[in-house]
Amino acid sequence: MELLSALSLGELALSFSRVPLFPVFDLSYFIVSILYLKYEPGAVELSRRHPIASWLCAMLHCFGSYILADLLLGEPLIDYFSNNSSILLASAVWYLIFFCPLDLFYKCVCFLPVKLIFVAMKEVVRVRKIAVGIHHAHHHYHHGWFVMIATGWVKGSGVALMSNFEQLLRGVWKPETNEILHMSFPTKASLYGAILFTLQQTRWLPVSKASLIFIFTMFMVSCKVFLTATHSHSSPFDALEGYICPVLFGSACGGDHHHDNHGGSHGGGGPGAQHSAMPAKSKEELSEGSRKKKTKKAD
């Protein structure tokens, strides 16, 4: 009975919430974040031609959430860069992923079973950052619900919400990839998580913070590991949004999804867009055919 009581959910959640993130969990967060940077088109060439720009992009992938949160709360944007241990650790990961001989480090961390472990550990960091962001915002604005939600959201979403700025550092401008327009699963989950943690912080949700951290972390780890293992770009929220959005907004929302924080959107247009594309294609084919006929007559 004593063993069972020691293993109760409350005790387990409390112990889990006290696990330090540095260096193991932070290392996993940096590895996965910089992996997604390397997946971006032209990122490898950028690292060879402009290593400083590539390093800055990597730092944004690792610490973009802190920069956005400091911007919202009116604190120095460069404040987190005084954390020498984290900066050096992230820089070492960046160098190994992009410049390790024979890409050995990259191949090791990309091996799916290993990558899934890192992805799971990254979600642990994400949820903890949301909770810390809510607590920090509550310290400044005791009754500012929207401030708390916004701070927790940017803490969890990382560089996704500033992806257009990160693209500019790589010499790319793709406004159509705006994360607000095409929210990925982590961005949506961070927003919903920020709402839950805000309700808990303001005592509207009758559950301890440790329990909420544990439950929401298990949800995020399960979903993200499954999506990564199956290479899926869908979202667990699609079914719920499919029922709610037509009722509240008159149409389905969130139809476009992309992988994690930075992939391109894969959502296509609706039936109307398909029908409108057909006549344009037919005109192109007709004009191409007429050009070929003219060429034959000229010959």
Image (spheres, rainbow, N blue to C red):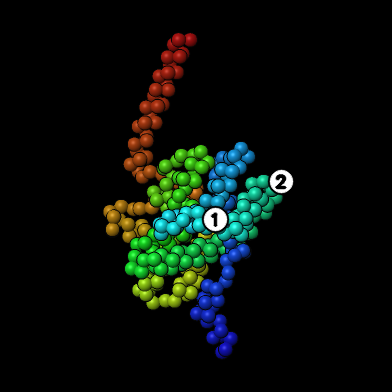
Rendering coords of residue 270 (x, y %): 36, 45
Q: Secondary structure at mark 2?
A: helix
Q: Residues within 10 Å of mark 2 (few under 14, many from 20)?
A: few
Q: Is residue 241 left or right of residue 133?
A: left
Q: Quadrant of the N terminus?
A: bottom right
Picture disc at residue 81: 1
298 or 153, which is in the foreground?
153
Q: Residue furthest top?
A: 298
Count how many numbered circles sit on residues in the image: 2
| Residue at 58% over, 51% down | 34
Looking at the rendered structure, the secondary structure element under dot 1 is helix
Q: Residue at x 41, y 68 (%)?
A: 139
Of marks 1 and 2, the one in the foreground: 1
Up the image or down, 203 lies above or below 184; here it is below
The answer to whether residue 189 is visible is: no
Residue 240's disc number: none
Mark 1: few, some, or many residues within 10 Å (few <14, many ≥20)? some
Query: Please, is residue 21 above or below residue 6 in the view?
Result: above
Q: Residue at x 33, y 68 (%)?
A: 143
Q: Which residue is mark 2?
A: 102
178 or 142, nearer to the observer: 142
Q: From the viewer's perspective, tell me whether residue 261 is left or right of residue 102.
A: left
Q: Where's residue 297, x and y in %?
A: 44, 11
Name the image quarter holding residue 204.
Answer: bottom left
Q: Which is nearer the N-term, disc 1 or disc 2? A: 1
Say if residue 270 shows up in the picture. yes
Tell me which amino acid carries mark 2: Leu
The residue located at (56%, 81%) in the rendering is 7
The picture places residue 212, in percent across and down from the top left corner, at 45, 72
State the image quarter where residue 292 is shown.
Answer: top left
Looking at numbered disc 1 in the image, what kind of residue is underneath it?
Phe
